[in-house]
Structures are given as structure tokens and as C-alpha cells.
Image (cartoon, rainbow, N blue to C red):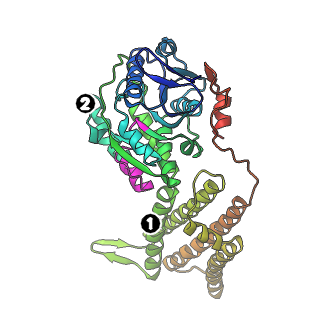
Amino acid sequence: MSSDFELSNGWKMDTAGTCELSIVMPCLNEAETLAVCVRKAQAYLAQSGVSGEVLVADNGSTDGSQQIATDLGARVVTIEAKGYGNALMGGFRAARGTYVIMGDADDSYDFSALQPFVDELRAGTDLVMGNRFQGGIERGAMPPLHRYLGNPVLSGVGRVFFKAPVSDFHCGLRGFHRERILALGLTTTGMEFASEIVVKSCLRGLRMAEVPTTLSRDGRTRAPHLRSWRDGWRHLRFLLVFSPRWLFLYPGLVAFLVGIVGTLVLLVGPVQVGSVGLDLGTMMYASALTVVGWQSVLFSVLTKVFASHNGFLPMSDTYRRLIERISVERGIFLGGAIFLVGILVALGQVIRWSDTGFNALDVAQTVRVAIPAVLGIILGFLTIMFSMFAGILAIPTRGVAVSARPPSAADQAEPLTITRDTVDERTA
């Protein structure tokens, strides 16, 4: 007996627990537009002959969205843990398809035109992103703030930070190989989830591609869930956190080099640049910049070690070899040497002071030597502490790897309810 059944509109759904494609729609009070989206997705499956399902991941709707989806033959899973990321992750976990295409249920994306996504997925692409700027944006569909500032800036940051081969970083219509995306260990629960998918796909070296897609004005009369400035900052913050090079290393290197060069130049004596005179005040600020830069560089390494050790970020072979060379002992030796130089310079000043019978010294000359001495003491101490802490972070620990698995019979029962504890357990 066949496990498939055919609805009156010709859409064929596979109920055996596996199919080629799951079309997942996160939903929170989308009664105005959900039916249109479900019908378009069903029409695509019927016309294309793709074996698939339409899955609505409901995040606590109170407007009857669940019943609308059920009446149309879509599968509904209830995600109790609130948040866009929780809703989508619950939908991905419950999906039966080898591939998943996700899209908002507000009728802004055309679920009847998914073939370019499926073609790319069948060709072996792991993540297929829609590009609204290539496919066309209907007038009024995207606020000018998003179209000309938010999306270009965040997409540019994503390309620079992570070498993401996409120009529309935040397109909500995207398809992917389900098991490979679940294996990324996605953890965010809010709007950052969309960025996390792309960032971790880049970091893990998954194959990515873009296809043109359209964006229409959504069919809702209520305000959208997205908040421009709040969610824009959350996306930017996420990108920075997952790129310690750009957050800590590069700014730190610039600050350190500018500071140390300025300190060493002014150690010789005052410098005149045109009508501007640089002396002890500038030297003090330059030394402070050196400390800030060095601390930022060390922090970038600690962040990378911690993130890699806990599976948040991958570590390249080059970076791993570099970290292995910077052993605890070598770091302590280097820090101790810098610290000792600072102490010796300071002792030299004390000896010189004693030679004068501890009388007053030339203030300018004393400060000019004291600044690099203090700088050496601080940099040396920071390096020693960094080496010891890095050694603690690098201690091997036993961890339990949780791999992505296909949904069990319990997962496929209808209706499916995914609680906060379930999401936390499955995304650990």
C-alpha cells in the first residue's frame, strides 16, 4: 500500500517519514497570509513533481493560524520556545525532507517559484540563498532604510568578515541540505538565527550559491515582527562576535603598532610635525594605546582558542600551528623577559637617582624613561597572564558529540509540540 496521499488540488505528500523537500514556514499570527503561502507551496510541489511536504512551525499563534494550515493539508508543529530561531530550528528538526526551503509566511516570498533552489540543491549545493536585489523588489516591499543602508552594510560586513559568496545576506527565502545545516550546531533563538546559518556555513566550508528571487509587499495589515534598529544591531553584534579577527585582532594590531612606534620615537626626544609639537603628553597616550592594542590582540587569541575548543568556531591549520608554537612556557618566558626589561630600566633610574643623593632629577628626562619602563612591566605581565590562561583553555576535555539525526516516529506524530527544553537538548 502506498504511503502517499493526494489532496484535491493535486498536491502529493509523502507520509512515510522521508521525502525530498520540506517547505518550512515559521508562523506567529499569520492568519491573513498563511493560506496563500501554503497554497503556493502546494502548487509548486504538484506542478514540479517533487516529493515533499509543507510544514508550518507555529510559535504560539492565537489567531487560528494552526487550523488554517491543518485544513489545507499542511503539517503543523507547535514550537513553545519563543523566538524566530527557535521556531525555525523546531521546524528543521521536525522536517522529513532531505532538503529544506524556509521562508516567511507573510506572502512576501513566492513559494510557487522554488525550482532554482531545488536545482542547486540537487547539484550538490549545501546552502542556496535567494537574492532579492537580483530577482526584483516590488515598490514598497522593503523599507528604504533596509534597502539602501541596513542590508548592504550587513551583507558587506558578512562578505568581508567571512568571505560569504552572497550579496543578500539576510534574504529570508533560502534552501539547504537539512542534515548538513543541522550539523552546524545552530544555537541562537532570535532574528540572529538567519545570520548564524550563513556564518557557520562559511566557517565550515559548506558549498553556497545564490539564485534570484522576488520580494513582494507582505499581505499583513499588522506591523511586522522585525524591528529595524534593534534587530539590525543584533545581526551586526552577532557578526562581530563570530569574527574575533575583525573585533579584536585587526583593531588591536593597528593600535599596538601606532602606539609602540609613537612611544619609541618620542623616547629619543620631542618631535615637531609642522606647527604641532609632540612630547611627553603624546608619549603617555601612545603608551596607553600600546597597552590597549596588545590586550586586544591577546584577547583575540583567547577568544579563538575558547571558541574552537568548545566547537563555536573552526580553527584553520595555520592558526592551529601558530597556537601550538605559543606554548605556556614560551609565553611565560617572553612575558617574563619583557617584564624584566621594564624592571631593569626602572632600577637603572633608581640607581641614577641614588647617585645624586636622591635629589631632584630632570622631570622631563625621568618621565621619558619611566614611560617605556612602565610599559614593559605592563606588557610583560599581560603576556604572562595570557599564556597561563590560554594553557587553561587548551586543556583537553571529554565532550559528548550530538549529531543530527532524522526524525523518529515520535517526531513525526501529529501534532508535534517542541518545548524549550526540547530545543535546548537538540541544539546542544
Q: Mark 1 or mark 2, which is nearer to you?
A: 2
Dot 1: few (<14), some (14–19), or many (≥20) neighbours within 10 Å? Answer: some
Region rendered in magenta: 155-174
Can residue 283 be seen here? no
Residue 254's label in the rendered image is: 1
Most distant residue in the bottom direction: 355
Q: Residue at x 58, y 76 (%)?
A: 373
Mark 1 residue type:
Val
Q: Residue furthest left?
A: 139
**Quarter-of-image position of residue 81:** top right
Q: Would you place residue 427 above or below residue 16 in this image? A: below
Q: Position of residue 138 (x, y in %)?
A: 25, 30
Q: Residue at x 55, y 19 (%)?
A: 60
Residue at the right extreme of this rendering: 398
Asked if residue 418 is among those painted magenta in the image, a careful observer would answer no
Residue 198 percent coordinates (x, y)? 46, 46
Q: Name the residue beneath numbered marker 2.
A: 138
